[in-house]
Amino acid sequence: MKKILILITLIGFVSCNSFKVDPITAYIIDEGQHNSYSYNFNNKRKKNPIAPILIRGNRLEFNFMFTSQHIYNYNIKDGDDINKLYGITSTKIHQNSARFGWRYIGNNKFEIFAYYYVKGIRDWYSLLIVKINETVKYSIDVSNKQYTFGANNNWHHVYNTKNIMAFRSYPWFGGNNTAPHKMIFKIIEL
């Protein structure tokens, strides 16, 4: 009887509207902040884990959709800086990393970038423009000396990379500006 009561209680908690944030895939950037964090099932704030990951088949894949909460005034100073969505880091983030970047460009559209550091040199490449509420499949293929970015069949290859160990790189707002309001990033890894 005790097991049944616990099960009913757990089902009630899972279906309750106050548990909208999925701790595995939802990252939050608060107003005035750059970095993101996530919640666990007890709705307690937690830091994003920094444990190394093994990328299945040497690929990180995820789906993501920008919504109206990701819109911001891009006409401000440095408003065209590239925000970071998700990706991986090998060694140090400003030395060797592969992330998807984004920025709001107006008219309910977002520009998506391959954003990366190779041996301490930063670069980026514009991959595509997406509309609000459009789900996009993103992937980063990692080999010993190469990153391959993919977003809805748009591709960019980065050569001569140094890939030792991979860590997830979580959402980050900026450049120089901090988030103008709270933003939630529901990232669904595949």
Image (cartoon, grey):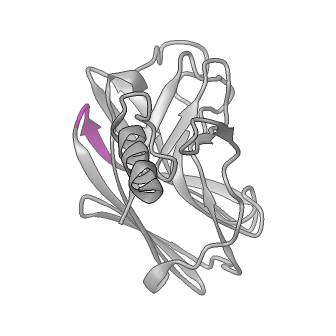
Coordinates of residue 102 in the picture (x, y in percent) = 45, 40
Image quadrant occupied by the N terminus = bottom left
**Left or right, 167 with reference to 140:** right
Give residue 167's quadrant in the image. Answer: bottom right
- Which of 79 and 141 lies nearest the eye of the viewer? 141
Magenta stretch in the rendered image: 128-133
Q: Residue at x 46, y 51 (%)?
A: 6
- Name the residue rendered at 59%, 49% in the picture: 170
Q: Nearer the viewer, residue 176 or 40?
A: 40
- Number of callouts in the render? 0
Where residue 154 sits in the image (x, y, percent)?
Answer: 28, 61
Q: Is residue 143 visible?
A: yes
Q: Nearer the viewer, residue 171 or 152?
A: 171
Residue 185 image point, x, y percent: 45, 39
In the image, residue 51 lies at what x, y percent?
70, 67
- Name the residue located 57 percent from the left edge and 35 percent from the top edge: 43
Q: Quadrant of the C terminus?
A: bottom left
Identify which residue is drawn at 64% across, 36% down.
Answer: 44
Along the horizontal axis of the image, is 63 left or right of 77?
left
The secondary structure that most of the magenta stretch takes on is strand
Whether the magenta-drawn stretch holds residue 142 is answered as no
Where 6 falls versus 31 (above or below)? below
Q: Note whether 67 is above or below 48 in the view shown.
A: above
- 88 left or right, relative to 153: right
| Residue that extends furthest to the front in the rendered view of this protein | 1
> Is residue 82 in view from this perspective?
no
